[in-house]
Amino acid sequence: MQPKTSEQIADLLKCLAHPVKLDIIKLLGANEHLTVSEIQSLLGCNCEQSMLSHHLIKMKDRGVLSSLKNGKFIYYKLENKKTVALINLIAQL
């Protein structure tokens, strides 16, 4: 795998730069996969499902998440568990 350019890294960090997205990453780091409804329930926030779906799609488009459709449900999971380690490292700064 090629090293990421500074522009690619900045684009990834911009994609993650939202409190709800960071919470989603933490949830998916602790769970194999979750649906939008499960994420909304576990977050316990007033984030509307449409906005939550928007965040999930943006992270999927950037390669942070992947999804699998099973019947009427779409399950999201982290593409790389190192993303959680990155968030934890940033939290220590």
Image: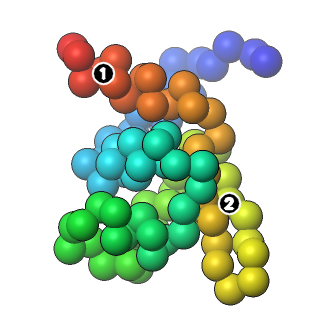
Q: Which mark is residue 69?
A: none
Q: Which mark is residue 67?
A: 2
| Percent coordinates x, y for residue 52 in the rendering | 39, 69
Q: Which residue is mark 1?
A: 90
Q: Amino acid at mark 2?
A: Ser
Q: Quadrant of the N terminus?
A: top right
Q: CA distance from mark 1 to mark 2?
A: 26 Å
37, above or below 13, in the image: below
Work out whether residue 61 can be spotted: no
| Percent coordinates x, y for residue 53 in the rendering | 47, 71
27, above or below 4, in the image: below
Q: Are marks 1 and 2 in contact (CB under 8 Å)?
A: no
Q: Name which residue lies at 36% across and 70% down.
A: 40
Q: Residues within 10 Å of mark 2 (few under 14, many from 20)?
A: some
Determine which quarter of the picture holds residue 60. Answer: bottom right
Q: Amino acid at mark 1?
A: Ile
Whether residue 44 sits left or right of residue 5 in the image: it is: left
Q: Name which residue lies at 75% across and 16% down.
A: 2
SS at badge 2: strand
Mark 1 or mark 2: name the one nearer the start of the chain.
2
SS at badge 1: helix
| Percent coordinates x, y for residue 19 in the rendering | 26, 48
Work out whether residue 29 can be spotted: yes
